[in-house]
Image: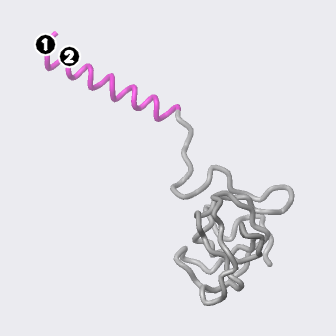
Amino acid sequence: MNLTKKFAVALAATALTAGLTAAAAPEAAPQGVAAECGVRSDGKLYCGNKAGAKGYAHRSYASAVRGQMNTTFSWFQCWGRGDAHGGGNNVWYWTKLDNGQWGNMPAVDVHTPVDPAPGLREC
C-alpha cells in the first residue's frame, strides 16, 4: 500500500473513531448551565450560579448590596420581576446569600436554561 493510501486509511479511521466517541458521549449542558438545575420537592430551585454574584436588597442594581455568593451551586426560594439586566430579561431570584443575609440575584448570574425557572413560585 502506498503512502497516500496509508494516510487516507489512517485519516478515515481517526474520523470514524472521533465520530463514534462523540455519539457515545452524553450531551453536555450548555455553557454556563449546571448539569442539574431544577425545582426539587421542597419547592426550591437548585442551580449553578456565578461565583461572587451579588445579592441586592431589592430587584435593582441601585439598591444596597446585602452580600454575595462565593459558592457556585445554590438554592433559590422564589423569583420576581425587577430591573432589566444583562441576561435579557427582568427576572431576579430570592436566596440566602453566603453571609446569611437574604438577597435578590439577577437571573443573569443564575445558570438557568430559561427564566423564570419552571416550577419555582413567584414572590
Write the residue at 56% across / 80% down.
Answer: 85
Residue matched to label 2: 6
Residue 52 as seen in the image, left or right of residue 10: right
Residue occupying the point 70% across, 85% down = 58
Give me the C-alpha separation between circle 1 and circle 2: 6 Å
Picture layout, residue 22 above or below residue 62: above
Q: Which amino acid does label 2 sit on?
A: Lys
Q: What residue is rendered at 54% in x and 76% in y?
A: 88
Magenta-tinted stretch: 1-24
| Mark 2 closeness class: few <14, some 14–19, many ≥20 residues within 10 Å | few
Q: Which mark is residue 2?
A: 1
Residue 86 percent location from the top left of the image: 52, 77
Mark 1, other Cα within 10 Å: few <14 / some 14–19 / many ≥20: few
Q: Quick check: is 89 in the magenta stretch?
A: no
Determine whether 79 is above or below 32 in the image: below
| Disc 2, SS | helix
In the image, taking residue 120 as reference, residue 107 lies left or right, namely left
Secondary structure under tag 1 reads: loop
Q: How many numbered tags mark residues here? A: 2
The image shows residue 110, relative to residue 64, as above or below, that is above
* Label number found at residue 106: none
- Foreground residue among 83 and 69: 69
| The C terminus - image quarter | bottom right
Image x and y of residue 31, in percent: 51, 56
Q: Which amino acid does label 1 sit on?
A: Asn
